[in-house]
Amino acid sequence: MTFSTEAVVVTGIGATTPLGGTAESSWNRLLAGDSGITRITADWAQDLPVQIAGMATVEPTELLDRVQARRWDRSQQLAVVAAREAWTDSNAEGSVDTERLAVAFASGIGGIQTLLASYDTLNERGPSRISPLAVTMLMPNGPAAAVGLDIGARAGVHTPVSACASGSEAISLGLDLIRLGRADVVLCGGTEAGIHPLTIAGFAAMRALSTRNDEPEAASRPYDKGRDGFVMGEGAGALVLERRSHAIARGATIYAEVAGAGITSDAFHVAAPDPEGRGASRAISIALSEADAAAADVVHINAHATSTPVGDIAESTAIHDALGAHAADVAVSATKAATGHLLGAAGAIEAVFSVLAIKNAIAPPTRNLDSQDDEINLDVVRVQGRSIDPKGVVLSTSFGFGGHNVALAFRGDRG
Amino acid sequence: MTELNLTDSATVLAAMTEIIEEIAGPRSVEITREATFDDALGVDSLTMVEIIVVAEERFEIKIPDSAFADMTTVGAAVDYITETVKRAKASA
């Protein structure tokens, strides 16, 4: 077996988020300090304790063929929109052997809107009214399969499912597939379309969501003393990965290197983070070790930072544990303040933001941070973005219910 | 909307044409009575099931799987639907 130690690089990005319908428009609104969180005005939300969310700004059905869109769950529609953007951006169509092209596309919940709507149909109108496509629309691997079909990927289609770490795990898997020689190019990412009264009620029952219904744009406030939970978002992010030599040979534009990934599990509690952040800290250390980098090389962290009271502190503890004294010198951004928490898509969106931070040499701002929690001793980038050295290491962290911890390490292409 | 006379096969053909194009998208060939769903119209088996589900709803009839298997052409489907609607009206 051959194990490639050659650099793996990002050659295409795409995103559809509560901030914008593309990676660039999302990034520009993030830099401007805008919020993607709004009040849910639909009737179904009026009796819920939480009535705010980050809805995708561009309806995916507006960009897709009508017949095709009808055959995809919203999570699949969003995935295909982001994947097409990344694929077009990579300019790989026609220059990649499709038998060496793989997909790793994650989702936290999968086609839950189709599942629940089909169940309503079953109860109200009987089994003969269930769509013959219900199963392919609700299965968790549905988005990966839709993306794989769309680009003609024949080297395997994968769906990591690890709650809110899913999107990052997909990128880690993409890196593995290339290093193991199982694919030359991997389109990876994550998608989520779970804004529904059931999921909101479920997360609200865990006391995980912000109830700041009257101030939607101020509700997601990572690291702030007044934070009271996360805000659900929907959307998708996608990245095209390949070996550096493969990218060079086909004349691709390189955004950044995916230098390492670390995956650990807490074995502590199914939902609560380990307060000492040991698993999260080890994930960061492993990612740095894979990247052959030291703590001092880290210039920016796109933190998981969901805006929950305990989670943000546990992650801060983990960052200090992994980076030591250097932790206080790193520009930390919590982009969920603007996007909300896109669950299984979060890691993918934040990987796109990390890559754009390197490309533009800037760490994006963290809105709503009026009064930083005393227990969080991090140098958080606030109202304005801050310049960073694009040759340094940028970390993106994601943690999920189940005790999943994923850290990704990116850095500028070293040529 | 005026009520369609669904015991008239030309009306049913027009309604079926609409359903086929709504579910499968615009077809490159004309939808005639003689057109086969699979070869001529390129309708795969899952799409066919979708078309039948919508037809059942629109014509307010039941199309059992046994009848469904014989509907290889648009005309066969139109005839089955027209007859079933007639019988339903007669027994109503």
Image (cartoon, rainbow, N blue to C red):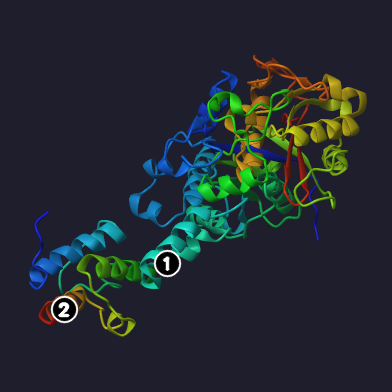
Total numbered badges shown on the rendered structure: 2
Q: Which mark is residue A122?
A: 1
Residue A291 horizontal side relative to residue A231, left or right? right
- For marks 2 and 1, give the CA distance: 25 Å
Q: Position of residue A178 (x, y in %)?
A: 71, 51
The chain carrying label 2 is B
- A407 over A71 or under it: above or below: above
Q: Residues within 10 Å of mark 2 (few under 14, many from 20)?
A: few
The amino acid sitting under disc 2 is Ala
Q: Which residue is mark 2?
A: B88
* Dots 2, 1 in contact, CB < 8 A: no
Q: Residue at x 53, y 58 (%)?
A: A142
The chain carrying label 1 is A
Tell me, yes or no, if residue A170 can be seen here. Answer: yes
Q: Position of residue A388 (x, y in %)?
A: 73, 19
The amino acid sitting under disc 1 is Leu
Q: Residue at x 29, y 73 (%)?
A: B39
Q: Position of residue A24 (x, y in %)?
A: 53, 28
Nearer to the camera, A189 or A304: A304
Tell me, yes or no, if residue A94 can be seen here. Answer: no
